[in-house]
Amino acid sequence: MTPETAPPAAAQGTVASRSLLRERTARKEAETLLEQKSRELYDINQDLRYLNAHMEQSEARYRTLVELIPDAIWIHMDGEIVFMNPAAVRLFGAASPEALLGTRAEDRVPAEFHAQLAEGTYSDLALAQLQPRSALQVLRLDGGTVDVEYFGCRIWFNNADAVMSVAHDVTERRQHEKAVEHQATHDQLTGLPNRALFLDRLAHAIRRAERRKERLAVVFLDLDKFKQVNDTLGHAVGDELLRVVAATLKKSVRDFDTVARLGGDEFVLLLDSPLGDTTPGMIAERIGEHLAKPVLLAGQEHVITGSMGLSLFPEDGYQAENLLRQADIAMYRAKEAGRNGFQFFTQEMQSRLDARMTLEQGLMRALQRDEFVLHYQPQVELASGTVIGLEALLRWQSPELGLVPPMQFIPVAEESNLITAIGSWVLDKVCATLRAWIDAGVPVVPVAINVAATQFAHQDLERMLVDVLDKYSLEPGLIEFELTESLSMADPEESIAMMHRLKAIGITMSIDDFGTGYSNLSYLKRFPVDKLKIDQSFTRGVASDPEDRSIVMAVIRLAHSLGLRAIAEGVETEGQVQLLAKQGCDEIQGYYFSRPLAEDGIVAMLRSGAMLELPLAGKRSRRTVLLVDREARVQAHFRRLLDGTPYELLSARKSEDAYELLASREVGVVISGQGPEGDRAIEFFQRIKRLYPGAVRVLLTSAGSADELADAINLGAVFKFIAAPDDDAHVLEVLASAFSHYER
């Protein structure tokens, strides 16, 4: 700047002041900024110190948490364990972490769980927290295993990638779950699988057998007479027997077979992959043999048997429930066949069961629809020939099946517990009918009613009888109860007490089907009964079977010795009537006098006073000869020979005809060659000798062999021989000698 252009001095001073002011302002701003930055730096340092302290505290808390947490935590890098918390040390059964640090992490897990270990490890902790825990096992140093729930995650540890594993010990919980599961699937008494587990195993076995084209079998076993053990020795002994049977069954089958208990004394077995057609039967026989070995119970040896039913896959079906049900059906068939054996299921059994179910359902409807009717069979006194009683016989008038006889539906009614209701209906119906007959002027006689075992054991029987007698205003003497032997002997003391109570009411009682059940004469003499009823199975053989006749005679004499009357049922022929009368039987019942009649027919009979015409007894005016031979030529020859002689000729070809003639007629001489149809002459004569010892027996030897003659002589079965029926003079001579012997 030239002097000419330089600013004046005052102007120069102003410029300098401004410059100084700017410098001061800048310096002050710089100082202020420096002070601000210093404060910020201080604050940052303070924050850093706080953060470091907080991080140190967090790390301490984290370490404390890891040390105290009950879950096991271990960290491994490159597969080697580098950290373990105390819970992990305890989990693996180590004395200290050093025992496991540096070892391979995968060695702490069984090989079969390696895949689950990998699947349970996630990329970070956040992801691991969202996933379900894996169930696996870890290995302890002592070789044991521990059930755990596990998860793993990748972390940054000591400036390197690592994997943290977390495991929660669930051994105690799993043991409890297994115990609960075992209780739900096993029988508590024997430890065997129960029904649910058995059906599950059977279903799996069926699917496997179907794939492999194999066979299997189901065995349903029910112990015979187990209830007797429980009742006589107590439930504790019964339980011990069930445990013994369970052990026996397990020893009787193969390792891969299943033995289960369904409940009570019912067991079931799965024979998996039998080795052929005979295997199931062989195993069933083995089970029977093992069960039959004596068992020591309450200090005494007992022999236990069982009834078994078998069903087969695929022959009998493809469903587990069906195979079990079919084996059950076959088991009941084995019981019906006599117990202590086995039966294979058949479709015929299924058909019978279906028919039984249909019958049972029909019986329930019959009660609701009043489809039952009563027929009555007269009971006749032999001494007078008069009708002195009736037996009420139940019939079912089914709209679908027609008139169903009791032998078809009574067993079903007893098994289905319908018999008590049916028995109540019968008692009420009989009393109502008697009341109606009395009101109509019919000459009534006592009516006998069969009482079933369940009805007799029912505590309401006594009250029910009193109520129904009061309801119809009947005299108790018009009702008779027929009780079976086995019913009476089921609980003798209670039976005696019940009988006395019934007797006090005023009814009469008889023991029905006597001789067919279990009899204890020491109890029988205490029963307040009025009659013994001879079963028809003995009555039918009284004329032809020596054993049956002996039983009939014994029952009649037993009844009379006890002051009771004897009544024979099932009397169908004149010969039976003659023999029963000779033996002193008091009453008879059967087709010979009358079949069971509907109400109208029996009322007509009672009004008419119908009587039995007793056959004439005693000797005939003519001598009676019975010729028993199958050849028409022989019979024709004797008819010609004896025509016009003092002899009356009777002839028979069949044994039943011959025995009836012997029973109903007084026969002096019996001549036989070949014997009746079905019998050899010697066998026929032996039976005649026992049944009718007074009849003289003559053998036609032309029809017999030398052996027969020797047998006849040795056995004393014949009186005379006739060499040939063609020698008329000789025949007449033998007949005269035989009758002379007979009459002496």
Image (cartoon, rainbow, N blue to C red):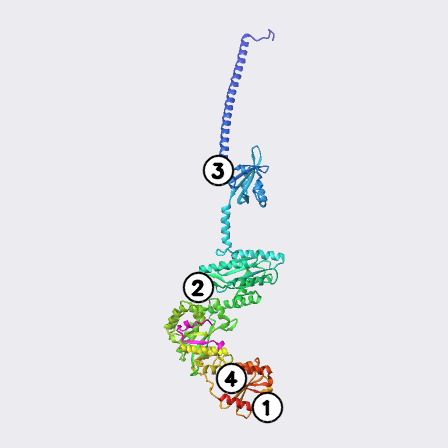
Instruction: Answer with mark 3 or mark 4, whichever residue precedes in sequence.
Output: 3
Residue 521 lies in magenta, yes or no? yes
Instruction: Answer with mark 4 or mark 2, whichever residue precedes in sequence.
Output: 2
- Which mark is nearer the camera, 1 or 3? 1
Give the residue type that dot 2 points to. Thr
Mark 2 lies on a secondary structure that is helix
Instruction: Tell me, for residue 68, which label it has, or none.
Output: 3
- Which mark is nearer the camera, 3 or 4? 4
Q: Label 1, on which residue? A: 727
- Which mark is nearer the camera, 2 or 3? 2
- The region drawn magenta spans 517-538
Give the residue type that dot 1 points to. Asp
- Which mark is nearer the camera, 4 or 2? 2
Residue 48 % position (x, y): 51, 27
Instruction: Tell me, for residue 662, which label it has, or none.
Output: 4
Instruction: Answer with mark 1 or mark 2, whichever residue precedes in sequence.
Output: 2
| Real-space Cα separation, disc 1 to disc 3, in angstroms | 127 Å
Q: Check whether the beta carbons of the residues at disc 1 and disc 2 lie within 8 A of each other.
A: no
Q: Residues within 10 Å of mark 3 (few under 14, many from 20)?
A: few
Q: Looking at the rendering, in which quadrant would you find the N terminus?
A: top right
Mark 4 lies on a secondary structure that is helix
Instruction: Answer with mark 1 or mark 4, whichever residue precedes in sequence.
Output: 4
Give above or below for 283 relative to 137: below
Give above or below for 403 relative to 219: below
- Which mark is nearer the camera, 1 or 2? 1
| Real-space Cα separation, disc 1 to disc 4, in angstroms | 26 Å
Give the residue type that dot 4 points to. Leu
| Real-space Cα separation, disc 1 to disc 2, in angstroms | 73 Å
